Amino acid sequence: MSTARLTINLDALVTNWRNLDALTTCETAAVVKANGYGLDAGRVGKALAKAGARNFFVAAAEEGGALRRALGPGPGISVFSGHMEGDAKLLKDFQLTPMLNSLDQMLRHFEALPGHPFGVQLDSGMNRLGMEPGEWAAVAEIALSQNPVLLMSHLACADEPEHAMNAQQLQVFREMTDGLEIPRSLAATGGMLLGKDYHFDLCRPGVGLYGGMPFKDAVPVVQLDLPVIQVRDLEPGETAGYGNAWTARRPSRIATVAAGYADGLHRAMGAGGIQVYAGETPCPVVGRVSMDMITVDVTDLAEVPDMLAILNERQTVDMLADAAGTIGYEILTSSGHRSARTYLG
Ligand SMILES: *Cc1c(COP(=O)(O)O)cnc(C)c1O
């Protein structure tokens, strides 16, 4: 075995979904875009459907088709990017619900798939997807006459609870939707933690399900174990890796471990003070991250194991993300393409 081993704990995923669900009195859906944040949308979706999730969200109709194959008929699958040119067949064949983002999408949908369920995405200030207040005011009557199943919007700053943008977007969303008696959704993981004003009828967590911030009480879902390829001894003054970026200050043992930036261990992590774990014992990653390998100072280990863990309950996706100057979402979606995978639960 010379590639990394990614272990995905579906029981932990379900625990996170249940714990997020318990924060609200509304329905809790699940966001499984980008192949379930890299963890396999089909497996993630099936585990959550079994636990009681009835609605799923993906980014693109193509992802929805793949998810429908895994889930079978029954659960709702909604598409954030709406009804794009050429999507009609996918939306119809796989019973996907587009979240329509513009007048153009609305006209396309009503013409291509009259009577096919849809929702409407409203822009409450993020300026990414959805109809702006003026546009919505102009077309709401037509849209409502076709019975949308959901009115939704998305928060730009929900991971910063004190940010004034949250209350501002809440107010805009309310002004656009109050009194319409259509189910509403505003909150993703961050919004769920802002309190019940943000919950409406349906919440759409993504990253929290997978063990990431801002859901600080999440249980870790992924473990990434890396095989040790070689171990060598260095004299003080010898260097390791590209650019001689690390110099031994004492007689040192260096383990070369099989994963690098091609496996989602961003090169920037090298300078960020990350560890790998031999069981409970942390060992510092030293020198530069290269494409397929990292080097680890294992001098203080009595014995070097066959595998060292870089993601586990002690070092989470968010800790790796901090070291690389990014966010847990990016670590999740970029890790594990080359790894052997095991699913627990
Ligand atoms: C990605 C996304 C979500 C899920 O967000 P998390 O922060 O991962 O919980 C919800 N809604 C929309 C529109 C999204 O793009």
Image (tube, rainbow, N blue to C red):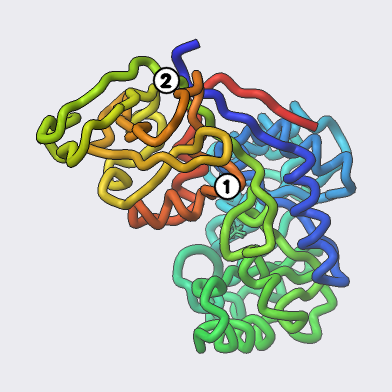
- Out of 258 and 14, give the one closest to the viewer: 258
Secondary element at image label 1:
loop
Q: Residue 14, percent across and down?
A: 79, 46
Task: Tell me if the residue at label 1 has its CB under 8 Å from ligand 1.
Answer: yes
Say which residue appears at 57% left-offset and 47% top-offset.
Answer: 59
Horizontally, residue 121 falls left or right of residue 268, namely: right
Say which residue appears at 34% left-offset and 56% top-offset.
Answer: 325
What's the amino acid at mark 2?
A: Val
Q: Quadrant of ligand 1?
A: bottom right
Labels 2 and 1 touching (C-beta < 8 A): no
Does any portion of residue 146 appear in the rendered image?
A: no
Say which residue appears at 55% left-offset and 37% top-offset.
Answer: 38
Horizontally, residue 18 falls left or right of residue 129, namely: right
Q: Residue furthest top?
A: 1
Residue matched to label 1:
59
What's the amino acid at mark 1?
A: Ala
Residue matched to label 2:
228
Indicate which disc residue 180 carries: none
Q: Residue 257, percent across and down?
A: 38, 24
